[in-house]
Image (spheres, coloured by chain):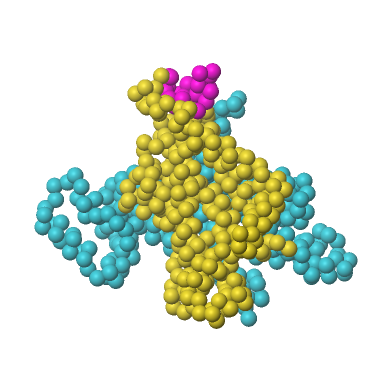
Amino acid sequence: MSIVAQRRRKGLTQFANSFRQDRTGMTGLVILAIFITTAILAPILIPDSALDVTKADGGRFESPSFSYPLGTDEVGRSILLMLAWGTRISLTVGLAATLISMVIGTSFGIMAGHFRGVGSQALVGVTDWFLVIPFLPLAIVLATVLGPSTLNLIIVIGITSWAGTARLIRAQTLSIEGRPYLERSKALGAGNWYQMSRHVFPNVFPLVLANTTLTVAIVILSETTLSFLGLGDPGAPSWGALLDRAFSSGAVSRGAWWYVLPPGICVVLVVLAFTLVGRAMERIVDPRRAS
Amino acid sequence: MLPGDPIGLYARGRNQDPEQLVELRRALNKPLLEQFLTYLRNPFDSTIDSTRFSRPVWEMIGERLWPTLLLLGTAILLASIIGIWIGIRAGWKPGGRFDRISTGTTLILYSMPEFWLGMMLLIVFSVGAFGIPGMFPVGGISTPGVDTSSPMGWLNVLWHLVLPCTTLVLIYLADYALVMRSSLIDERKQEYLTLARAKGLRDAMVRKRHAVPNALLPTVTLIFLSLGFVVTGAITVETVFSWPGLGLLTYEALRGPDIPLLQAIFLMFSIAVIVANLIAELLYVVFDPRVRS
């Protein structure tokens, strides 16, 4: 095993050990594990017919009972089963959109920090523009033009939520740029791509990872909001779409709290869990907080 | 910038004259700068109608502006006062009981979709659930038929304002309290506080006179910078409470989709956010002499 690989493995073990001692971080991880298991097992445990409007067997807006632990919706489907399916969609959208956002944010951040001159200034300008522009109106305009579908939702959220990451990564890149090993590799004739991929990226990576976890939390909230406004796939029962349906079917004025409360609790738990894990990771890897 | 065929969208389901379509396409092929200027001018042009309401876009925005300013202004004011107060108490004794409880609560509020909180408040306090009688209206800005310029009318509006405003205050204060707390914690390590204590100042005086004014800076800036985030809350919460402001107008425009109206609203929100950012920069110079040099 090379020295680098050994050192990386040692760093990883150290990270795992510090993380295990962080109580709030571990709580978040346990909550996440439960939701991810639900998302993976949903298609095995729950028949497709649970989502089929024509095969709904309950009454309209039935309050929680033994056969429907969380009651039924406006056409008589079990809310508990829809919620479990929703976990799958909300988490998929959350993770996929975060991936897009991280790829754009990290590459913009590293390039803006590595290069000098007009190009770098342009990158910073674009980043600032995306930071300042209000997220929801921009996302609404994009989603309206692209049309409602889960894939479009992922794209819209991904390309509107990377600016914060880019700024963070740029700041970190700037501090790495001044280190002697980068100067050494420049002196030995390393190209821009080599410097960025071999030296800068591995060094900003822990921060990227911590930031990813925090971004997932924000992205899931964005997904809920956009789906609530009817900009997601109408057929996919994500948590936001469930809330949209509850709202437009009049569950609120009927006092059908069992239709509104559970999707919201799920969103809060997942977002909170990602935030707790992300903050714990940040405490371990962020050099500015390590004192 | 945006993909899709605006002409196709515009002409969808109508019998359009082919010549008219050609003319529309020619308008779209004008130089970009000219198109951009037209885009900037359009919302102010009294002849541009909303495709859904057949009324000038600018007029509709004008009459929806005041309810939004009332709701958001009240909510931001209350949220910043309460949020900063919580942040100071929590940040001065980090790890204490107040800090643990308030940080837990604010983190949960921070993770909440604001419209969901609004829906829950509606179910509990205006429809009535869990044994609590409904005591607040289900939506709108005033009871139909009430003259809103009379003192009774004002009370009526206030009564309608309670639930949407509470929703927004709870969501916004989470952000403010978290930032105030962390900037006060950063400030606690500074040497001038040790000096103030060494001079024999009481703890409360050290906090009030020395730590808080400095820790306030980032928080005040954040309150102005968070306006983009505030807009998000306005759109969904106004929808839930049918509050007749710009947010509800956005939702109505979306259901069309009413592109001219959406464009004008988007421009309006962007201008508001940029102005708020500018104010934040200027305030920073006023409050922090260190930046001036």
Visible in this render: residue A11? Answer: yes
Looking at the picture, tell me which residue is in the foreground, B6 or A172. Answer: A172
Identify the hue of chain A.
Answer: yellow
Q: Residue at x 59, y 55 (%)?
A: A210
Q: Main secondary structure of the magenta part?
A: loop
> Can residue B146 be seen here?
no
Give the residue at x 59% y 26%. B130
Q: Is residue B178 left or right of residue B44?
A: right
In the figure, is residue B162 to the left or right of B85? left
Q: Where does the magenta region start and end?
A: A58-80
Percent of width and height locating residue A124: 48, 70
Instruction: Give whichever of A271, A30 is nearer the camera.
Output: A30
Q: Nearer the viewer, residue A207 or A129?
A: A207
Chain B colour as displayed:
cyan
At x 50%, y 24%, the residue is A71
Location of residue A61 (image quadrant): top left
Query: Residue A12: x, y in percent?
Result: 64, 55
B277 vs B166: above or below: below
The answer to which of A101 and B116 lies nearer the viewer is A101
Tell me what residue is drawn at x 52 percent, y 72 percent. A195
Q: Is B239 left, or right, of A265 in this rendering?
A: left
Quadrant where the C terminus of chain A lies?
bottom right
| Count of numbered badges drawn on the protein | 0
Q: Position of residue A228 (x, y in %)?
A: 43, 41
